[in-house]
Amino acid sequence: MGEERIPTPAASDLLAAPIQPGWTADRTRESLHRNSYTAQLTESFHRFIDELLTDQLDGEFAIALLGPDDTIWTQRSLGGGWDLLGAHPEADEGSRKTLYTEALRMDSSDHTLTLAIRAPEPSAELPIVLRALRLALAAQLQADRVERENVWLIDTLTRSNRATERQSTLFHLAKRLHELNDVNAILTEWMACLDILYPWLPKQLYVSQDHLCPDIPVKPLALHGSEHLCSRAFMEGCVVLSDEPPESLGDSRAAAVPLKGKQGVYAVLYLESISRVLAADDLDFIGLLTDAAGTAFENAQLFEQTVRLVHELQLINEITQRLNQSLSLQDIFQYAADELTAIFQAEFACIVELDRTQHELVVQASHPESFIRERVSLDYGFAGLVMTKKEPVILSDYRSDCPIDSVWMNATEARSLLASPILEHGEAIGAILIAHRAPHYFSYSNYKLLQVLSGHIGLAITNASLHAEVRRMVATDHLTGLYARHYLDEQIAAFQKKDACGSLVLLDIDNFKKVNDSHGHQIGDHVLIQVSRIIKSCIREGDIAARWGGEELAIYFPKVNRDQAIHVAERICRKVREETTPLVTVSCGVSDWSWNDAKLSVETLFYRADMALYKAKRSGKNQIKFG
């Protein structure tokens, strides 16, 4: 028997063909969309026709499957020349109406399908065959429903197991991360977890400078612009997907996942080729893992900051106590340089002080020591910069187009620098420089700590300077600028304990009472100042000149014998006669001591010089005598 699969008729054919009473043309419109379920049912329809009907029916007939809206899903012609809604051209009018139908209820639905068969003439076998076909299709529908339910259950169970595994992984990772108090360890653990879960996924971690991790391959996060994927994720604080696939990755996309906490974003995880290897829920899961790592990272960072702040407070307290224990400026400078080098693990340190008289900067302490006592102008280098700006400076790399020249940085070959001014009542009195030969060595926390320490160092320097000034005022005669008598006594006693010899010269301005009576006490004071200035110009830096009392002055020469002392006294007498206004003269008495003499007290030394001075006065003044 010949057979033919007849295509679905057009709407015009359907309207022209005779149909079963109660059917309408509006309900026989062909469906525009047939899903996979319809395709499977159609395939089963033709298979069952081949198995059940082809060998059991003789003659010519057409059989069709209609959808819920009476649209013909598919039809089959056996014997040729027939379709369901048409008729054989040679058939009479009665045969056109020989049509049998069976309702086929769809599973889990209120919709009903219809099986329809048309033959040239009535037949008792056709309803039976049609019912058998309906039962076979119903059984197929039931089997398909069971299969779909099984697939759905397996898929649901698989997704549930996967979700459970992910929740367990997330829980254990979060627990492990929160047990760690080290930011580098947290980054390492998190990246190791991602490598285990997604070993095939290309990924790169970009972190800020303060959080560079030496244990995993990371790159510094550079904000290349608001349109860069990592820059957008860092600034927006959310997962960012590339708008268009990069040409180098074909049809794949990239994603940037921020590592963030409540206080900000600390790093960005860059993922490549995500559309090739990741489902949407995988990206969500990576986001959850990253959020857990970000929270743990922030907590560890806060813990480290707390520990560091406690350590810094202890350090500041210890340094302040040590600085206040010493009232020597040079000791303070050297101790500060040594401690700062140790605290910041730097290679070089330098402390400069403002010389107010010369308007220069003097190096008071330095590593290397070859720079000590060097002088530079007030606006030179980084020391001049921080003193001018009164603000600290942090430099990551001196070699990277630095506009400021520094002899100290060039000599040490340093690249990283911290510099801070030393302030006193808001005015810069010095500067601290700390350097290292590695670039990007110092952090912002180092910058802030140096700023705090420089304030305490400045306070210690101020206290020592005030103490030195008070001691100088106590030990110095206010009028002449020479030392006071008690200071001279103390220094002579100290020199006698360590030197082999020394000489003392007592000077007295001749006829000083007459000068006061004739010219007034102001002129007399001026004469004292002139003579004191001449004495200072004629002695060495280590010699001690003092006002012994009234118009009497004294000079002690350490390690100088009698003849050398007399020579200096003669030069002083000559310059006094020539340079004072009004002109005056001086008389001198000289005494000395040496280690081979019997123990000679300070009082005895002064007594001998005083007796010699008395002899010079009695002998006519303006002369030198030895006692």
Image (cartoon, rainbow, N blue to C red):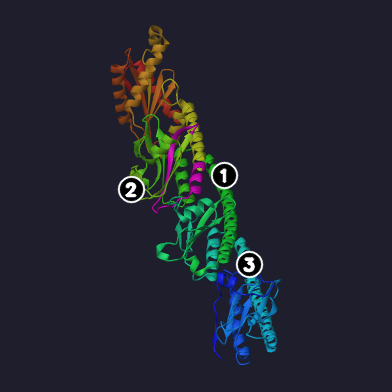
Check if residue 34 falls in the magenta segment: no
- Indicate the quadrant containing the N terminus: top left, top right, bottom left or bottom right: bottom right
- Specify which label sits upstream in the sequence, 2 or 3: 3
Mark 2 and mark 3: Cα distance apart in space: 97 Å
Q: Which mark is residue 205?
A: none
Q: Earlier in the sequence, mark 3 or mark 1?
A: 3
Q: Nearer the viewer, mark 2 or mark 1?
A: 2
- As drawn, the residue found furthest toward the top would be 518
Circle 3: residue type: Asp
Q: Front-most of 323 and 130?
A: 130
3D distance between C-alphas at marks 3 and 1: 95 Å
Residue nearer the viewer, 215 or 40: 40
Q: Height in image: 2 above or below 490?
A: below
Q: Which residue is mark 2?
A: 411
For label 3, the SS is helix
- Chain-order first, disc 2 or disc 1: 1
Give the quarter of the figure containing the C terminus: top left
Q: Tell which tag, 3 or 1, sits nearer the viewer.
A: 3
For the record, the magenta segment spans 424-452
Residue 12's quadrant in the figure? Answer: bottom right
* Label 1 sits on residue: 317
Secondary element at tag 2: helix
